[in-house]
Amino acid sequence: MATVIAPSILSADFGHLAEEIKKVADAGAEYLHLDIMDGTFVPEITIGAPVVKSLRKVSDIIFDVHLMVEHPETHIKSFAEAGADIITFHAETAKHSHRLIQQIHELGCRAGVAINPGTSLSMIEELVEDAEMILIMTVNPGYGGQKFIDSMLGKIHMLYHMIQEMETECDIQVDGGINPKTSVDVREAGANILVAGSAIFGAENIATAIKDIRGQEIHHHHHD
């Protein structure tokens, strides 16, 4: 699968978000990763649906909305209406994950389910066939610029095999500490959508940074 790059607005200049989005879209990013934080599930507060709605007017890039919030069920509709293309909620916050996935689909969006580094894959095993994407957090969410947790590579690989065995289609997204070096490792493990913040927005040349994170295509050999 071709690698998709999703720059995270967490590392963008919030004073010039419209320009920052245009910059990464022009530089070849396919998705824009919108980190929605409520100050409860994670320590920080970022932006809400009204800001997403205003950003939607300035860009047609795919809006990949990552809800790091308690009670995601109360927020899904407002983000769908604000222009989200993909809505990802955390398995740790959901009482009825299947129902949330259905709700996201009914609103015309793709559904993603995220799990933190300390959360087992068994939490999402039943959801792989219904969700379009599983997000493996490779840092503990809440802050940008953190170091990649190496032990997550095994988890990505296990998820990749789980999806293969179920003979279903499901994207694997990774978020946290992604740069040209860790990109190779996560892509070898099976990830195909890479969220990167400081490695893109902090770069001298954004187009080069995106190209370097995208890297060379990796071919996975399926063992039958």
Image (cartoon, rainbow, N blue to C red):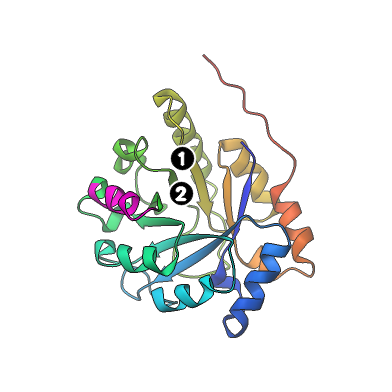
Q: Is residue 47 above or below residue 66?
A: below
Say which label, 1 or 2, has the lower sequence index.
2
Whether residue 42 sits left or right of residue 98 in the image: it is right
Residue denoted by label 2: 136
Q: Nearer the viewer, residue 224 or 145?
A: 224
Tell me whether circle 1 and circle 2 mark residues in contact (CB < 8 Å): yes
Please report the bounds of the magenta region as a residue range: 99-108
Quick one: quadrant of the N terminus? top right
The number of numbered badges drawn on the structure is 2
Distance between the alpha carbons at the discs numbered 1 and 2: 8 Å
Amino acid type assigned to the residue bearing label 1 in the image: Lys
Residue denoted by label 1: 155
Q: Is residue 24 magenta?
A: no
Residue 75 position, x and y percent, is: 30, 67
Tag 1 secondary structure:
helix
Q: Is residue 105 magenta?
A: yes
